Image: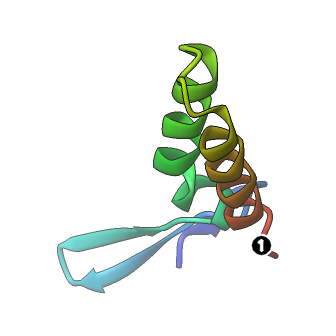
Amino acid sequence: MFGEEKCGCYVVHVELDELEIVYCPKHKAIDDLYEALKALYNGTPDMFNAKLKAKQALAKAEVK
């Protein structure tokens, strides 16, 4: 392991010439967070479902 970022992400050696980023929960949830924010911003007709997806994305990002 090379070091850990403040958020919790870190880089590890997988093979001699290959590195892998291990993402923290917040960065793992970035796609879900983006989609939820986009739906809320665009004013989707199904606001209940958009808010539910946002709540689920935030819960996923806040896992410790």
Colouring method of the image: rainbow
Give the image quarter of residue 51: top right
Task: Tell me residue 8's x, y (percent).
Answer: 71, 65
Q: Which residue in the rendered view is the most extreme toward the top?
A: 42
Task: Tell me residue 25's x, y (percent).
Answer: 65, 66
Q: Which residue in the rendered view is the most extreme toward the front?
A: 45
**Residue nearer the viewer, 36 or 16:** 36
Q: Residue at 77% x, 73% y: name it.
A: 63
Give the image quarter of residue 2: bottom right
Task: Tell me residue 10's x, y (percent).
Answer: 57, 67
Above or below, comparing residue 14 to residue 28 in the picture: below
**Residue nearer the viewer, 30 or 46:** 46
Q: Quadrant of the C terminus?
A: bottom right
**Which residue lies under the disc numbered 1?**
63
Above or below, comparing residue 12 to residue 24 in the picture: below
**Residue nearer the viewer, 43 or 16:** 43
Q: Residue at 58% x, 54% y: name it.
A: 27
Give the image quarter of residue 47: top right
Q: Which residue in the rendered view is the most extreme toward the bottom?
A: 15
Above or below, comparing residue 14 to residue 64 in the picture: below
Q: Residue at 69% x, 51% y: name it.
A: 52
Left or right side of 52 for 42: left
Q: Residues within 10 Å of mark 1 (few under 14, many from 20)?
A: few
Q: Residue at 63% x, 25% y: name it.
A: 40
Left or right side of 24 for 45: left
Above or below, comparing residue 19 to residue 6 in the picture: below
Q: Disc 1 marks which amino acid?
A: Val
